[in-house]
Amino acid sequence: MWAAPTSWHFGAELSKSTDMGKTWDAPEKMRIKMPATTKKSLENIWQIAGGADPDTLYVGVAPAALFESHDRGATWALNKGLWNHPHRKKWQPGFGGLCLHTIVTDAKNPNDIKIAISTGGVYQSADGGQKWQVTNKGVSAYFMPDKYPEFGQCVHKIARHPTKKKLFFLQNHHGVYKSTDGAVTWKEIENGLPSNFGFGLTVSENGSAFIVPLQKDAERFTPEGKLRVYRTRDEGKTWEPLTKGLPQKHAYEVILRDAVTSTGNNIFFGTKNGKLFGSFDDGDSWKMIEGSLPEICCVKAYTL
């Protein structure tokens, strides 16, 4: 198991457990460290993802960089293809910093890697990370003079359909999208949503996509004080609010980008107020698993 703790004193580090979390190591030398030639320092670790084979791991960090290991985490290296991309020096930080927060790999194709950066947008590689192509066509950057720039979008999350490998969903700073051509071009799918602002996104085993809309940029809480998860079963043509078991009064909750996840058809999400909710029927009903945890910034679930 891998985790990325951070503190104001020690900074961010990558830790490993070989006993399912009972103990964690504390290596003398940081596993993830910006090379001196970059003249940058590691700010935070945002994402840990497995590659197409058990030897390969990826880590996304701020300032917007990708690290990779091909020996099960024994050694790590900065992905130079992305770091040397001509767009990199023009990327600007979002509210959470200039972070590479999403990594999507393909278990059947080790050369296929897709990432999302705030604020840079969606980039992908077809050769294992040597070269990177920007693929934001159709995604709006409403805060920029050019509303549809080549790059600079504040993409919050992307997720792939489990069986339709070219079908992707995207939650933007303001905007919900899908792609049917492998995350190359995007189309809005916002019909029936109370807001197009939000962070978390997941797709269950049967292909249902789930988001938790928030009011808007300056009001980052659930609309109308109702905690509603929205689900689409027709690839974004329609969305339905899921409320059974969720509070519908005075529920001004905030759900962060990595706090929504799924395993099989079980869906889980956590809030900044420390509430953890779960559904075991593809979102039809929900229950609160824990109600008084610290702020929840990340939820991961696995089927053993």
Image: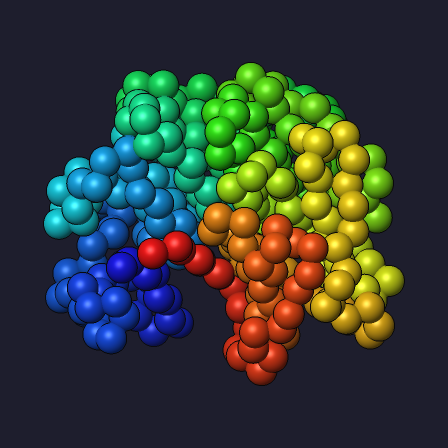
Q: How many marks?
A: 0
Above or below, 25 relative to 185: below
At which x and y percent is residue 271? 61, 67
- In the image, taking residue 54 as reference, residue 268 lies left or right, namely right
Give me the residue at 60% from left, 67% from top.
277
Residue 20 appears anywhere in the view: yes
Q: Is residue 144 visible?
A: no
Q: In this image, 132 relative to 52: left or right?
A: right
- Residue sitting at the far front: 281
Front-most of residues 96 and 210: 210
Q: Position of residue 60 (x, y in %)?
A: 38, 45
Looking at the image, residue 80 lies above or below residue 55: above
Q: Quadrant of the N terminus?
A: bottom left
Residue at the location (13% across, 66% down)?
28
Vertical relation: 65 (above or below) 276: above
Task: Please give left or right for residue 84 compared with residue 150 in the image.
Answer: left
In this view, the residue in front, 159 or 41, is: 159
Percent coordinates x, y for residue 239 in the rendering: 77, 41
Quadrant in the picture for residue 185:
top right
- Which quadrant of the figure contains the C terminus? bottom left
Q: Is residue 71 above or below residue 86?
A: below
Nearer to me, 8 or 198: 198
Q: Image quarter for residue 152?
A: top right
When asked about the image quadrant of residue 244, the answer is bottom right
Q: Residue at x 26, y 43 (%)?
A: 57
Q: Nearer the viewer, residue 246 or 27?
A: 246
